[in-house]
Amino acid sequence: MSNLPNTLNSYWLWREISSKLGVSNPAYKYWSETRNLKLNNKYLFIQKNTLPQKHEHVEKILTDLSGHLPIKYASDKLHVNEHIFSYDKMRLHKEFEYKFVEDVKFVNIKKFFTEFGIRVGRNSIVQLGKIKDLEIGPESTFYNLKNDYGVVVYE
C-alpha cells in the first residue's frame, strides 16, 4: 500500500506532546535526537521513540495516528476540496472515520482505502471526486464509490 495512509504511523502530534508536557512550542528544536515531520507547513509531528529520555513517559498517553492524516493534508493529497471531510452534508462525509486531537481533525485514510479495496502504489497519484470530474486514462485504475463518486489511481 502507498505511503500516504502510513505517513503518521510512527509519529505523534507535536501540539499534543507540548500540551501534555507543558513545554513551549519551539522546545522540540532543542532536542537534538528528536526527529520531526512537517505537513503542509502547518502540522508538526515528532517521531515516536525519539523524545528525550526525561519526556518518554508521555508516549503512553498520546493519541496513535496510524492510518490517519490531517484533513487539509489529506484533501491536498487526494486532490479534493477539504469540505468533503468537514461537513456532514457532503455525500462521502460519513464514509470516513474521524479523530480530533488538540483541535486538529484527522481522517482515517487507511480504513477508507481498505474498505473500498483501493490499491495504491508507492509513487501513485490519487484523485477522489465526482465521477464526471475525474480524468480516467489508460495508465490509471478507477474505483467506483457511493453517490456518484470515484477514486482514480494513476500509476
Image (spheres, rainbow, N blue to C red):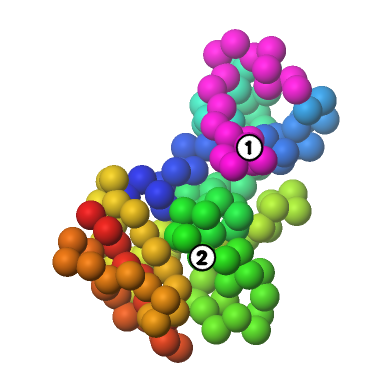
Residue found at x 53% / y 59%: 75
Q: Mark 1 packing: few (<14 Cα in 10 Å), some, or many (20+)? A: few
Q: Element type at marker 1?
A: loop
Q: Residue tagged by mark 1?
A: 41
Residue 100 as seen in the image, left or right of residue 124 = right
Residue 27, position as x, y percentages in the image: 74, 20
The amino acid beneath tag 1 is Asn
Asked whether residue 27 is drawn in magenta, I would say yes
Q: Are marks 2 and 1 in contact (CB under 8 Å)?
A: no
Q: Residue tagged by mark 2?
A: 80
Q: Name which quarter of the figure residue 21 lies in.
A: top right
Residue 7 as seen in the image, left or right of residue 117 = right
The amino acid beneath tag 2 is Val
Q: Element type at marker 2?
A: loop
Task: Give the mark nearest the N terminus, 2 or 1.
Answer: 1
Image quarter where the C terminus lies is: bottom left
Q: Which residues are magenta?
A: 26-45
